[in-house]
Image (cartoon, coloured by chain):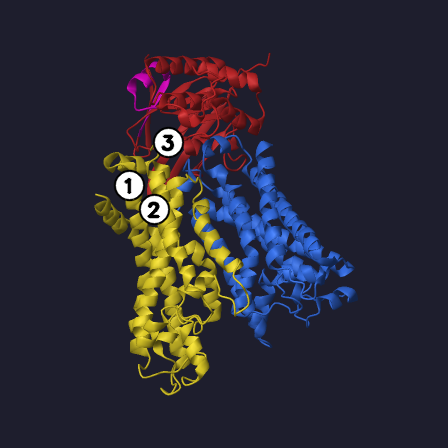
Amino acid sequence: MVIHYALAQTRSSLKQLGSIITFFVLLIIMLQNFVHNVLLYQGTDVLAMIHPMELLTLSPNAADPEWLSIFMQIYPLLVTLPSVLSFNRERQTGESILIAARMGNLQYTLGRLVSVFLTTFVVFTVPFLIEIPLNCISFPLEAQGDVLSMDLYDPGYVDYIHCFLFSNIYIFSPYVYAVVGTLFWGFCSAVFAAFAAAFVACIKFKYTVFSMLPAFLFLNATVMFSPTTRDVPSIAWYHYLFLFDDRLKNPSYLWAIPILILISILGTVWGGTHDCIG
Amino acid sequence: MYRIRYDTLVAALIGLLSGVLSAMLFVRPYTGSITLSEMVLQLSGSRGTYEFNPSLSEIMGMFTRFIPIFLFEFYGGTVMYRNFCTASIYIFTRNPNRSRWYFRETARVLLLSVVFAAVSLITAVLLSMVQYDVITNYPGVLLSIYHFVLFSIWITTATILLNLFSIIFGTHVAALIVIGLQAICIAALSLIEIEDQLLPAVLLQINPIANLILGWFHSRIPALDEAIFSPHKGFSFVPALFVVSSYCLLTVLSGRQFILHRDILSSNAELDGV
Amino acid sequence: MQNWMVFSMLLCAKDICKKIRGKTVLSHVNLELESGTIYGFVGRNGSGKTMLFRALSGLISVSSGEVTLDGKVLRKDFSVLPNLGIILETTGLYPNLTGIENLSYLASIQKRIGLEEIKRAIRRVGLDPEDKRTYRKYSMGMKQRLALAQAVMERPDIIMLDEPTNGLDEDGVDMIRKLILAEKERGAMILVASHNKEDIHILADQVYRISAGVVSQREENVQ
């Protein structure tokens, strides 16, 4: 019943205005990057051309820095938009009571958590997955250039590559790396949204803006407290989520993701076992 | 009275947090001691003795300076808006002069913004004095006043805007819009690198965030101008005050018109957000 | 003792229309309402009774026409009717406050009455002013009673009640009717919207029918 409700709720959430707005904001950001690259590189010789996958929106070195900075700044708010709005609304209108009366409060909150995860995953992954075949069609697949103009035979290039998350996949195939990286981006975004949703399950926020504070504070804290020197591993979220990021990372920091998942589930269960007074 | 005392306390607490974070993260005395002027410049975007330059990392650094301000804006963004939520009909039927009600609420937002900005700056200065050897200088006092005034006015503007957008869209979407606008203004700081073109120069001059970066200022006071130690960037206090105040006035006046014509259709506006 | 008697007032709606998102919710409404009279408004759900009250009170603007009170134009000379008591739909109060705290907060806006009058109003509706329970814990009937208390506590000149007997038991309905009649004796102008024919039959001096935003002929109510 939980899965059935979750899937039904996901289908409904994807049609909500919050999800649609978020999707189109991401689509516009992606299209802006794509058009910018097409105009920038048109007429470039294939020998000098950058690899098509390094021109993706999620590749910060190639992206238009102004648009990228705007995207990075609003991401912590955007990631919770599709999910938190509808969850909070159900709580406030009392609709949650009607649903909980039919399936139990715990099943309802767990189903909600799953639907938040799925909705955010779809909304945050699809626009960037679309960009991959667009780039393959628009830019020459033979291009091997690097956006930082590094020589492929330079020993420093090896260190550069090994800073990437999933560097082994990149070495195997940059295209597979792009797909895996985009799915990872969507997965992490969904985890952040689920984290916010878990708080909503536990605490009744009067104003929806407060319900996105946990995710907002968590993501911005990783930026605020991230070491500024390059020889110390970063903790900023965008260094781990973006593709082709050459900043030094500590893969053990990725344990934060399963910890967030665990907190989300535990928080949701705790919220779901309380009296459903409304 | 209880409500305003509570709001003031919350504003002060957020200001305290902001001051602590600012002192910890943005005040960097690279030589062990730091002048007050250098400290205030760092609080408004400079890094060490380098003025703010719009690389991606510095733009994100500028954004992180605004995070405590955004936290205040989230709270302050409900001050006026909450009257459109619970018991809205009962409140507005007891306020025959809605214009007066609006200006009273605007004054309340201004008070909270001033409290936040003051507590934030004072906390940052005091904490830095504890941690480092802070040398108080006359340009530093002037820059502190400029910083306090300009930031207070801008925070008031953004908070009122958040209240107004919340009435239309609900708080979450309003927060996205207001922070999005500020994010665009922060990103647009990169226009400083485009020289000798009229449109970018004009856009930069009217960019409210650009008018908060004291490291881009020049002054007719020689000691102050020397303390800012950056090449002339075309900003100074009076024009910056004019730009930021203009945005504030425009927001307040537009808000008044909006509030006067706003139909009270819903008893709980938060439900009618996007 | 303060004189709470209401001076005679005339509330007029002159050909008011209201459209919301292209849909006409009020159409060419003309009314003349006097103090010391109870006006009943009957109509089905969605006929426009609540919208009419919103328009007459000033909570919403009208697309055309005007509402005047003793010659002064609403939304021009004042934003809302002065000294108005109103209950609309399912408007709630602050869930974290007790009944008396809620009413004290509302009374502090205009500062017309003190704590004693608030307590008196709460007792008039059959509630206990010393009740420490928060609004969140009230039953629907208690919430309705408290809403009525806030509507009458400041001795308003004009009282608009949208479905005042909603959720009340027999005793509660009786109490509300007596309270409304007492307010009429005081000289207040009272507008009552209800789809309950018995309420209208017992209370109203004149009855208007509303259908699809159109207010049709006035009837003298034979009680």
Please state the chain letter of the residue tagged with numbered disc 3 in the rendered image: C
Image quadrant containing the N terminus of chain C: top right
Give the percent coordinates (x, y) of residue A146: 41, 80
Q: Is residue B191 above or below residue A119?
A: below
Residue A134 lies in quadrant: bottom left
Letter of the chain shown yellow in the rendering: A
Residue carrying label 2? A265
Q: Residue at x 38, y 34 (%)?
A: C51
Tag in front: 3 or 1:
1
The quadrant in which residue B25 appears is bottom right
Chain given the colour red: C
Q: Is A125 left, or right, of B152 in this rendering?
A: left
Q: Nearer the viewer, mark 1 or mark 2?
A: 2
Q: Amino acid at mark 1?
A: Tyr
Q: From the viewer's side, name the closer residue of C30 and B123.
A: B123
Residue occupied by mark 1: A108
Which residue corresponds to the image point at 43% horizontal and 58% vertical from the top-left? Answer: A75
Query: What segment carries the magenta color?
Result: C194-210
- Spot occupied by residue A242 in the image (x, y as percentages of width and height): 41, 66
Q: Which residue is mark 3?
A: C50
Q: Residue at x 32, y 62 (%)?
A: A125
